[in-house]
Image (spheres, rainbow, N blue to C red):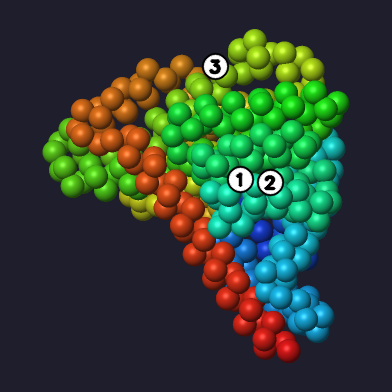
Amino acid sequence: MTSTPTAQLSDLGVSIWLDDLSRDRITSGGLAALITDRNVVGVTTNPTIFAAALATGTTYDAQIRELAAAGTDVTQAVFEITTDDVAAASDIFATVSASTNGRDGRVSIEVEPGLAHDAAGTIAQAQQLWKKVGRPNAMIKIPATVEGLAAITETIAAGISVNVTLIFSLERHRAVIDAYLAGLEKAHAAGIDLSTIHSVASFFVSRVDTEIDKRLVEIGTHEALALKSKAGIANARLAYEVFEQAFATDRAAALLAAGANVQRPLWASTGVKDPSLPDTLYVTELAVAHTVNTMPEKTLQATFDHGVITGDLVSGSYDGARAVLASLDELGISYDEVTALLEKEGVEKFIVSWNELLDTVSAALEAAR
């Protein structure tokens, strides 16, 4: 019997993390089943995911009533609800974490998106979330804004594992790796066991295509249209080259020799937005060892059902990827402008989702009272 596509990805060195979490998934056994049935070895969350989870079903009702009876305000209620979910999910993945020495079995929870440009606030909340979840296989998500870079360094320096999110540009990816290495150096100087610190760099894929394809259609020439849906994969492949180069330096080698772990690239935003594209595009084309692919359930199921895994399609693809970005530049599409816009929009979208989450919980608390 041939192995499934998700098992083939795992054998290739790709860690499959589910980009979704809800209490219903936890309590129904559905999340645990994905470990055995779909090779899922981690979970990521964000304000949008929690907003959707809280808006449906009844699995949060009992806790909402308890929080309402205690007079808990809405911000603290959200903190309690989301950290409880992450702690419970972390327990489900504890065996995976143990068997991979903490490399996988990770469950990520994000700092409030309104803190994206507040380094001190991010550092403080990262420590609060880490302490409240209280699980060694949790991971704190920090956005890769300019201000976020300092927060990444200080959070890593405190021995806290970090999922760096909202990375769009190669330049920012380099800065994120530098922030991680700086944090490891501080942790090492403080006597912290570097082997206990893990990090991933979440590089967003489909959103790059969505924005650039819109501009290519506006140009409308044959040359422009021939580049549709190529930028996201090219950008991600070059991010992998950045990863390879950064962890081959003497600086990184010294830290790795001291027990540190590499900061793996994580492919985020891997659900296909253009229905004309193969629904497994951002999985199969970015299959390469030492990466994480965080998939919405729809993408996960599509990959399991009909994904065709043909091996490593990233290593050695860098010249072709550079040619794609060069062609976009020749057409007048500014890479720097696009990636800056996507970061700005990414933070804004998460703030909107966070406010929706607060509104949902506020209404539930009021109804319970």
Q: Mark 3 and 2 residues: CB-CB less than 8 Å, in contact?
A: no
- Give the label on residue 109, or none: none
Task: Identify residue type, mark 2.
Answer: Ile
Q: CA gap, disc 1 to disc 3?
A: 28 Å
Q: Which residue is mark 1?
A: 119
Q: Secondary structure at mark 1?
A: helix
Decide which of tag 3 and tag 2 comes sooner along the chain: 2
Q: Position of residue 309 (x, y in %)?
A: 53, 33
Q: Position of residue 218 (x, y in %)?
A: 18, 47
Q: Position of residue 360 (x, y in %)?
A: 60, 76
Q: Secondary structure at mark 3?
A: helix
Decide which of tag 1 and tag 3 comes sooner along the chain: 1
Depth check, mark 1 against mark 3: the one in front is 1
Q: Which residue is mark 2?
A: 123
Q: Secondary structure at mark 2?
A: helix
Q: Is residue 135 left or right of residue 119?
A: right
Q: Mark 1 and 3 residues: CB-CB less than 8 Å, in contact?
A: no
Q: Which residue is mark 3?
A: 245
Q: Residues within 10 Å of mark 2 (few under 14, many from 20)?
A: many
> Quadrant of residue 365 in the image?
bottom right
